[in-house]
Image: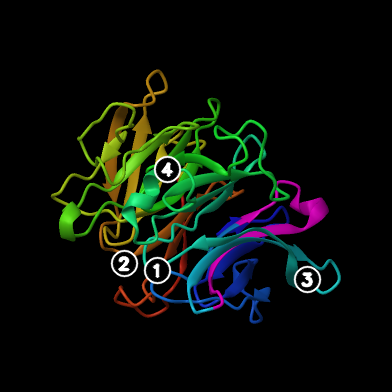
Amino acid sequence: MAFSPDGRIFVTERPGRIRVVKNGQLQAEPWMLLEVAAVGEGGLMGLALDPAFAENRYVYVAHTYRAAGGQLRERLLRLREDPVTGRGAVDRVLLDNVPANSIHDGGRVKFGPDGKLYWTMGDAGNPPSAQELASLTGKIMRLNPDGSIPEDNPFPGSAVYSYGHRNPQGLAWQAGTGRLYATEHGPSGGAFGVGNDEVNYVERGRNYGWPLIQGDQSREGMVVPVKHSGRAETWAPSGATFVSGGRWDGSLLFVGLRGETLYRLLPDRADPSRTLAFEKYFAGRFGRLRDVAQGPDGSLYILTNNRDGRGSPRQGDDRILRLALP
């Protein structure tokens, strides 16, 4: 979900449709339809508008596809809106042939305050790959808007910004400091246990431990989360945003899929590894929640995700909810 300067909301739908909401109304025709592999957690996922969208009309998306031989792969595209027709078309492929799976495909796409494009990728069901710098799975990546590698990336010639991630699905930058925070899914069973969903303070070149550590575990050279769910509950955290204004000014908000909750975390500006407050809202009220953003009008916008095969759809699902800040 992303807001354009003219007030439209761009929304991705997993089967490959990019939809537009204008003046509170969902437009009947998709802005663009992409051929994707909507398998399990794959399909059309993250979307971001260029900071200079009003001038260049660029839109960036990540999606899963089937390569030759049937293997699932992930790619990052730059699209462009035709100023005459108002429809989108592929401009260029920025990054391609990233291993994918029916699980753990990450998929968040966002611009940072540095003007660089960030893309999260899960471990694609291959946990050891998160520790391999030669692999792009289990990583947060950083690119120039044209797909080239920034010269100041931590690993020369590589898109990798941070590694050791299981399935990061939310990115948000703190105003004033430019600090990056990311939400990440913990394991849901098997050899790695269950729980330990995370909020991480992400710094360039750092190792966030998966699959070698999780939760409160620590190891030299690896970063522990700012906050984690423990094993008693599951958040399955997705989209995240920092809030400006109101009683929640400076708070990090993120939403939960399995947790079906809006979470508010207040980071300590003096020590970004500490949390000053943590609260939960709307538990179970709207079902699975995929994304949260603060709109140009200051309101919160929350995207539900009850028709993904794991939720219990209600009348009117899926929806974008608009809420006033406290």
Provide the secondary structure element on which disc 1 rests: loop
The amino acid on which the numbered mark 3 sits, given as a three-letter code, is Gly
Rendered image: mark on residue 287: 2
Residue at the extreme left of the image, as rendered: 232
Sequence-wise, the earlier of marks 2 and 3 is 3
**Other-residue count near label 4 (Cα within 10 Å), few / some / many at <14 / 14–19 / ≥20:** many
Mark nearest the camera among 4 and 3 is: 4
Please give left or right for residue 92 compared with residue 295 in the image.
right
Mark nearest the camera among 4 and 2 is: 4
Sequence-wise, the earlier of marks 4 and 3 is 3
Sequence-wise, the earlier of marks 4 and 2 is 4
Give the magenta-colored segment's residue range. 48-68
How far separated are the C-alphas under marks 1 and 2? 7 Å
The residue under label 4 is 182
The amino acid on which the numbered mark 2 sits, given as a three-letter code, is Gly
Q: Specify whether residue 164 is in view.
A: yes
The residue under label 3 is 86
Specify whether residue 123 is painted magenta: no
In the displayed structure, would residue 12 be above or below residue 198?
below
Rendered image: mark on residue 130: none
Q: What colouring method underlies this structural image? A: rainbow
Provide the secondary structure element on which disc 4 rests: strand
Provide the secondary structure element on which disc 3 rests: loop
Mark nearest the camera among 1 and 4 is: 4
**Other-residue count near label 3 (Cα within 10 Å), few / some / many at <14 / 14–19 / ≥20:** few
How far separated are the C-alphas under marks 3 and 1? 27 Å
In the displayed structure, would residue 265 be above or below residue 66?
above
Sequence-wise, the earlier of marks 3 and 1 is 3
